[in-house]
Image (cartoon, rainbow, N blue to C red):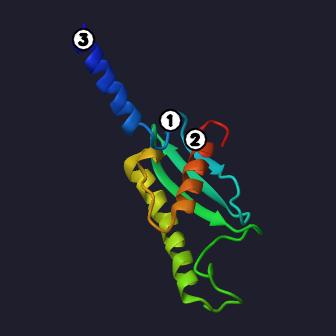
Amino acid sequence: MIRIAGIALSIALTLLICGCGASDTAIPEEDGLYTGFSSEDDDGAYGEVTVAVEDGAITACGFVTRQKDGSIKDEEYGKVNGEISNREFYDKAQLAVRAMQQYADALVELQSAAKVDAISGATIAHGQFLEAVADALDGDG
C-alpha cells in the first residue's frame, strides 16, 4: 500500500512539474481551412493563423501578426517612414517576423501547438500564435 502511494505521489509530482506547459487543442476531424485570431497586445497588435487540416493532420499553416491598423508585420516592420532609424529595434522586429514562419512550420511538423517552442526575442508572437491556433481549432474558427 505504501509503495502504491509512493508511485501515485511520484506521478502527481511529475505531472505538476512537466504539465505546466501550453495546453493543446485537438485537430478537427473535418478537412478544411481553419482561421483564428489572438487577442490584442498592449499596442493593439494581434496574431492571425490559418491552419489546413486534411485526413486528421495539419498539412499547412500560415501565421501573421497584424498591427493595430490591420497591416501585416513584414519586412517594413520596425522602420519609420520606410527607413531604418533604429537598427537594434528593426533587428528585433524582424526577428519576430521571421519567427512567425518558424512557428507555422513547427506546427505542421509537430502536429501540436503545445510542442512549438518559443523563440527568444519573439515570445509575444509565440503567445499570439498559440492563442490564434487554439481559436482556429476549437471549432469556432
Query: How would you rate the neighbour count of disc 3 (Cα within 10 Å): few for under 14, some for 14-19, many for 20 or more?
Result: few
Which residue lies at the image location 49% right of the left edge and 39% below the top edge? 24
Query: In the figure, is residue 111 to the left or right of 128?
Result: left
Question: Which residue is identified by label 3?
Answer: 2
**Residue 15 x/y as whole percent:** 38, 31
User: Which image quadrant for residue 9?
Assistant: top left
Query: How would you rate the neighbour count of disc 2 (Cα within 10 Å): few for under 14, some for 14-19, many for 20 or more?
Result: many
The amino acid type found where label 2 is placed reads: Leu
User: Which image quadrant for residue 81?
Assistant: bottom right
The amino acid type found where label 3 is placed reads: Ile
Question: Which residue is identified by label 1?
Answer: 26
Secondary structure, mark 2, is: helix
Label 1 and label 3: CA atoms lie apart by 37 Å
**Residue 79 x/y as whole percent:** 64, 85
Q: Name the N-terminal-most of marks 1 and 3.
A: 3
Verify CB contact (< 8 Å) between mark 1 and mark 2. yes
